[in-house]
Image (cartoon, helix red, strand yellow):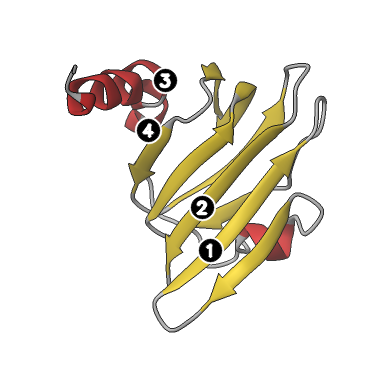
Amino acid sequence: MKPLVPIALMSFMLFFRPLLAFADTEVSSSAQHAHIASPEQYSLLLENDQVYVLKMTLKPGEQDNWHRHNAETVYFEKGGRATISVGENQMTVDIPDGHVMWHDAWEHQVKNDGDTTIIAIIVEEK
């Protein structure tokens, strides 16, 4: 059986590392959390003293509103082609089904540029 850690690390490096290099900026206190800024795309599955658990559903051609996340882990149940905007920068990525990523707090906007619905579960620190 092949080890999963190198595959996951390589996947992170290929898909999100270049974007996160310029996403390392301060998070604005004025940006809203995803489920408040874009309730059509983000549903709140659970909230407690430690985390928000969100489900993101982004249909083909759909774009969420500018929003923020605290440190988060994201599991892409269904991936797809997405353009992620961070400040003035954009990156288009092909996210594979089952991809998992983690990063610190950030602000961004996501557009589904593909022809399939992107579905992700997000566990975000409070």
Q: Which residue is mark 2?
A: 122
Determine whether, in the image, residue 2 is placed left or right of residue 103.
left
Q: Please name the residue that numbered disc 3 is placed on.
A: 15
* Quadrant in the rendering for residue 46: bottom right
Mark 1 or mark 3: which comes first in sequence? Answer: 3
In the rendered view, would you say 68 is above or below 98?
below
Question: What label sits on residue 91 in the rendered view?
Answer: none
Q: Amino acid at mark 4?
A: Leu
Instruction: Assess disc 2: are there few (<14), some (14-19) or many (≥20) residues with their C-alpha within 10 Å of its C-alpha.
Output: many
Q: Quadrant of residue 79?
A: top right
The residue identified by callout 1 is 53
Q: SS class of the residue under badge 3?
A: helix
Give the side of residue 45 with respect to residue 58, left or right.
Answer: left
Q: Are marks 2 and 1 in contact (CB under 8 Å)?
A: yes
Residue 66 rendering spot, x and y as whole percentages = 67, 48
| Residue 32 visible in the snapshot | yes
For the residue pair 89 and 110, the one nearer the viewer reads as: 110
Q: Residue 56's x, y, as percent?
A: 66, 47
Q: Earlier in the sequence, mark 3 or mark 4?
A: 3
Q: Looking at the picture, which amino acid does disc 3 mark? A: Phe
Q: Residue at x 74, y 30 (%)?
A: 117
